[in-house]
């Protein structure tokens, strides 16, 4: 269930509860006012107390709703954790198609090859040429298991959404970017430049449930212009790693 739906439910429940409390308290006050044996001054005093109680309850409900929504939004941000989401759009154009390999170096820079022996495979992909970002359909990661010198089998082929272009602040490391890549980016920047600049950084995380053995990992991007092609081009880099 999305945060928006949960927030709407909580808000609606709070309004209903507040309305019920208001009705119940109003009925109680009216009953007292109709009681001929009760003096007018006492009725006003009780009415004032009842109204204050209703105001306190409504205020408490509002605070509870605000805190609940804040916690839900914080939880959603923690779940995202700066990692690119799996793509579900336009996959029919690339799945079950043999692809050609293209050189992504002119367009992208990467962190070092992911650690196959860590809990998760973490891949960082940044774009040198931001003009190509709008032409990218999705990011892609393909993992082959090396059976022997002449044979390999595909054990993972996953697509990921590309992040939009945002301003990069060199004084703050973006969420998801490892320290090594952040240091490398700062080293490439012109000296004395401390103003935010446009960037498109992507952070892919894959659960490491691979068996022991040798693997080839390919990661890069696919272009929208290849939608109709029989053999689309996979612009990527690759590395071979061994899980122990």
Image (cartoon, helix red, strand yellow):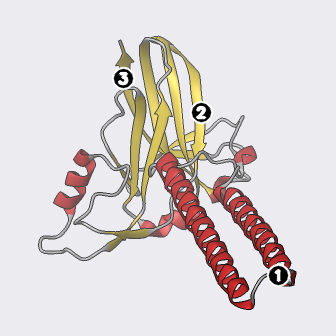
Q: Residue at x 36, y 23 (%)?
A: 241
Q: Is residue 83 visible?
A: no
- Looking at the rendered image, the quarter that the C terminus falls into is top left
Query: Dots 1 and 3: beta carbons under 8 Å?
Result: no
Disc on res. 84: none
Q: Is residue 211 visible?
A: yes
Answer above or below: position of 125 versus 114: below
Q: Does residue 170 appear left or right of residue 40 in this picture?
A: left
Q: Residue at x 49, y 19 (%)?
A: 210
What residue occupies the far front of the structure in this picture? 37
Secondary structure of residue under mark 1: loop
Query: Dots 2 and 1: beta carbons under 8 Å?
Result: no
Q: Does residue 31 appear left or right of residue 103 in this picture?
A: right
Q: Does residue 174 appear left or right of residue 220 in this picture?
A: left
Answer above or below: position of 184 versus 209: below
Q: Which residue is mark 3?
A: 241
Is the residue marked by circle 1 packed among few (<14), some (14-19), or many (20+) residues within 10 Å? few
Name the foreground residue: 17 vs 105. 17
Question: In 3D space, how far apart are the residues under numbered discs 1 and 3 (Cα atoms)?
Answer: 90 Å
Q: Residue at x 42, y 32 (%)?
A: 121
Question: In 3D space, how far apart are the residues under numbered discs 3 and 2 (Cα atoms)?
Answer: 17 Å
Disc on res. 157: 2
What residue occupies the far bottom of the structure in this picture? 40
Q: Position of residue 64 (x, y in %)?
A: 57, 62
Q: Residue at x 83, y 80 (%)?
A: 30
Question: In 3D space, how far apart are the residues under numbered discs 2 and 1 (Cα atoms)?
Answer: 82 Å
Disc on res. 37: 1
């Amino acid at each position: 269930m999305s945060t928006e739906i949960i927030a709407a439910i909580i808000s609606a429940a709070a309004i209903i509860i507040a309305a019920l409390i208001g009705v119940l308290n109003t009925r109680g006050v009216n009953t007292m006012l109709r009681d001929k044996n009760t003096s007018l001054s006492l009725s006003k005093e009780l009415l004032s107390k009842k109204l204050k109680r209703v105001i306190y309850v409504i205020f408490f409900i509002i605070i509870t709703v605000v805190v609940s929504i804040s916690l839900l939004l914080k939880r959603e941000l923690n779940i995202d954790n700066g990692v690119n989401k799996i793509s579900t759009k336009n996959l029919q154009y690339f799945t079950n198609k043999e692809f050609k390999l293209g050189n992504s170096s002119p367009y992208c820079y990467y962190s070092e090859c992911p650690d196959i022996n860590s809990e998760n495979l973490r891949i960082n992909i940044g774009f040198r040429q931001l003009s190509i970002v709008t032409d990218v359909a999705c990011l892609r990661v393909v993992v082959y298991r090396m059976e022997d010198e002449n044979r390999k089998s595909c054990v993972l082929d996953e697509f990921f959404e590309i992040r939009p272009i945002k301003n990069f602040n060199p004084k703050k490391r973006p969420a998801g970017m490892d320290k090594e890549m952040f240091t490398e980016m700062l080293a490439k920047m012109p000296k004395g430049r401390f103003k935010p600049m446009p960037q498109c950084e992507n952070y892919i995380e894959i659960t490491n449930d691979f068996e022991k053995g040798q693997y080839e990992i390919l990661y890069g991007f696919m272009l929208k212009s290849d939608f109709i092609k029989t053999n689309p081009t996979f612009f990527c880099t690759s590395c071979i790693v061994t899980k122990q």
